[in-house]
Amino acid sequence: MIERTVEQVARMAGGTLSNQALGEVQIHGVTTDTRKVTKDALFIPLVGEHFNGHTFATKAVELGAAAVLWNEKEANPPEDVPVILVEDTLTALQKLAKSYVTEEKPRVVGITGSNGKTTTKDMIHSVLQTAYQVHKTDGNFNNHIGLPLTILTMPKGTDIAVLEMGMSAKGEIEFLSNLAEPDVAVITNVGESHMQDLGSREAIADAKCEITSGLKEDGVFYYLGDEPLLRERANALSHNVKTFGETKDCDIQVTHMNQLAEGTEFQVEGYAQAFLIPVLGKHNVRNALAAIAVGQHFGLTERQIAQGLMQTKLTGMRLELIKTDKGITVINDAYNASPTSMKAAIDLVGDMDGFANRILVLGDMLEMGSEEETYHYELGQYIKPDFIDHVITYGRLGALIAKGAIEAFGEARVSSYMDKDELKEKLAEVAGPNDVVLIKASRGMRLEEVMTAL
């Protein structure tokens, strides 16, 4: 974490220390949340539409904060600790993070994409830490507030920072990329997430490619070579550009994939050994290819890369495999959902052999824009009764998944609910020993709550 005197922090954040006599007070870390105040931290009060963090500054000091950033227009700053006056506390937080990453000089890997960026981040971190001191984004702290906070928790001596960059609108990734100035930029794919805000996959591809705006002049851009929209845009870049994927002209190309009970095994062109990731789903092989590419970039051996991939631990609720006391296998993938990731998860369950029944519990995909009803209905049509035994849906849009699925399944094997308790009753009725159940929806649906039925 950042460790500086308040005088140094004031300079880095573009602020003014209210009492120069307190300039040598040392801060250890930063926080914007009084629930996470640690001893000698710098408290940064942010201002939102419905809150003002300045009202919590006194409490932060009582809990052990050593200093406070303060918007100079706010009245009554604390009197018993150093106060750094700034025009805007959020801008100061971002300036502080940029100064810190510039001073500490880690090499930076920036990652974005419609799907799989958090999984890819976890895999890249696992691979690189076989040889380096690596810091990564915690959870999904990947926006204009989360990314600066991630940088400021980076330990001194970090060799490589692996930073996830998220977005909800055009220009956001450009800002994050210019803040972090990555040495390596990675785009996992272009999907339908944020269609509501951006309107088309072309616009989403443009927004994702903003990650190259802050890429260092000698940096390398890795992207999914199977995506034509990314290829079109990469051709216009002056940076060193490399690809990963399934098509034959990819620089890192997968040649074989095999779904196992304990994970997914695959082979890569030019590598002698097979790789194993402890993650379900052949679509996750693409994420692993990105990790191989980055590992290769930083000079890791084939053995180190294989070891790192095998030791990957994913952030929760992303294809999380759970075995219940009743002998039911549950795949909890309730963190996020889009048509692309939904189809990948459905294909995964369809490929899993040795189960009595394969059951899908699917909920609404949010932020899909004006075509949301079509996406859900077509997803239902995508599900094949030869590979799936039961389809259970939740939510208004989930009902359209059910409607699409009934065309091939008939009504006996498809059910739809607006009430989670009723869904739980149905799930408890149909799921039994040696069955596999996929639970997937957008985070806002909180569909993981139905797991209690199992």
Image (tube, rainbow, N blue to C red):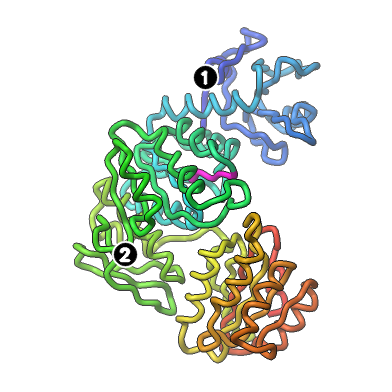
166 is within the stretch colored magenta: yes
Rendered-image quadrant of the C terminus? bottom right
Identify whether 140 is placed above or below 79. Answer: below
Q: Amino acid at mark 2?
A: Glu
Q: Can you give x and y, in whole percent of width and height, for residue 194 in the image?
A: 58, 51
Decide which of tag 1 and tag 2 comes sooner along the chain: 1
Residue 351 vs 55, above or below: the answer is below
Q: Is residue 441 left or right of residue 345?
A: right
Does dot 1 land on a helix, a strand or a loop? Answer: helix
Residue, disc 2 = 246
In front: mark 1 or mark 2? 2
In the image, is 409 to the left or to the right of 225? right
Residue 446: x and y in percent read 70, 63
**Front residue (pair 330, 251):** 251
Percent x, y of residue 443 = 65, 59
Query: Mark 1 belongs to which amino acid?
Result: Met
Please rate how many residues cluster around mark 1, counting C-alpha atoms within 10 Å: few if below 14, some from 14 to 19, many from 20.
many
The crowding category of the residue bearing disc 2, from other C-alpha atoms within 10 Å (few below 14, some 14 to 19, many at least 20), is: many
Residue at image location 60% in from the left, 75% down from the top: 380
Range drawn in magenta: 164-168
**Discs 1, 2 touching: Cβ within 8 Å:** no
Q: CA distance from mark 1 to mark 2?
A: 45 Å
Q: Is residue 197 left or right of residue 288?
A: right
Q: Is residue 262 magenta?
A: no
**Which residue does the numbered mark 1 point to in the structure image?**
12
Taking 199 as reference, is 226 above or below it?
A: below
